[in-house]
Image: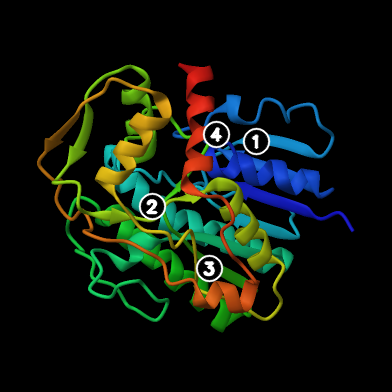
Amino acid sequence: MAKTILVTGGAGFIGSHLCEKLIEQGNYVTCLDNFFTGSKKNVEHLIGDKHFELIRHDIIEPIRLEADEIYNLACPASPIHYQFNAIKTIKTSVLGVTNMLGIAKRTKAKILQASTSEVYGDPLMHPQKEEYWGNVNPIGIRSCYDEGKRVAETLMMDYHRQHNVDIKIIRIFNTYGPRMAENDGRVVSNFIIQALKNQDITIYGDGSQTRSFCYVDDLVRGMIALMNKDGFHGPVNVGNDGEFTIKELAEQVIKLTNSNSKIVYKPLPSDDPVKRRPDLTLARKELNYKPTIKLEDGLKKTIEYFESTL
């Protein structure tokens, strides 16, 4: 049966892929976005579809809507964007999440919060398991995002315990793919754009820090699986547990783009985690989740996208 689904941040990189998939499954999707980091062009191919509605709105401000399910993705997610207006970023995770939980409570909707691997901070446990409480700087330049998302998880759990709201918490690890914002300062988009322009590829630090890269289609599958899993609330890690150094990523991008770019090294920004890799044991067990798209294949699709937009 078709559901009415609210996706906040639905015109963003991940949100637009999620909207597409939910419509493909026959649902009615209301996409809410204030276009701070999202873009109308990410969803313009859906406008006019009777299953899709686009509303310009900032979730910091209350709104009355009806929904069977809510996916709360609204929040700038790259350091450049979330540090641009740090106070607004944390308000999105506190006031915004409270507003969305209010809708869920009133309409008895299931609600999924897009949390992040950043709740683990610069982790002292590797790979990161869900029961790890993290190592986060509460007063650093990234804390508007890291601590904001931690508070969002707190709010979700408190609404669940106090008001019996059916909540889902997903901790998203580095995700990449078509429709990433060109200027978002994330490592995959940065490297691809620099390589396509034959500019120097900038690595912050010595390139030995590691990340795990999840292709967006794999992530969306994990999100929908979590929403549809009765009786399981998370938090659950979803990502790809392949681990690569930043230098390896740069070398792969240079190879796949046939670029003449050289790698240059710059100082590491503060509070930048040294390593990141999800432990996916829980996601495998509860959601039957496993990432299917190899880094090389995902990079090829992402490179194609940037070639068409540059």
Which comes sooner in the sequence, label 3 or label 4? 3
| Residue ID for mark 1 | 55
* Residue at 21%, 32% in the rendered image: 202
Residue 164 in the image: above or below residue 189: below
Disc 3, SS: strand
**Residue 15's image quarter?**
top right
The mark found on residue 301 in the picture is: 4
Amino acid beneath label 2: Lys
Asked if labels 4 and 3 touch by Cβ distance under 8 angstroms, the answer is no
Which comes sooner in the sequence, label 4 or label 1? 1
Which comes sooner in the sequence, label 4 or label 2? 2
Disc 2, SS: helix
Disc 1, SS: strand
Q: Residue 175 location, x and y as percent?
A: 46, 48
| Residue ID for mark 3 | 169
Q: Residues within 10 Å of mark 3 (few under 14, many from 20)?
A: many
* Residue at 68%, 50% in the rendered image: 6
| Residue ID for mark 2 | 91
Q: Residue 227 location, x and y as percent?
A: 67, 65
Q: Residue 257 location, x and y as percent?
A: 41, 25
Q: Residue 243 location, x and y as percent?
A: 36, 58
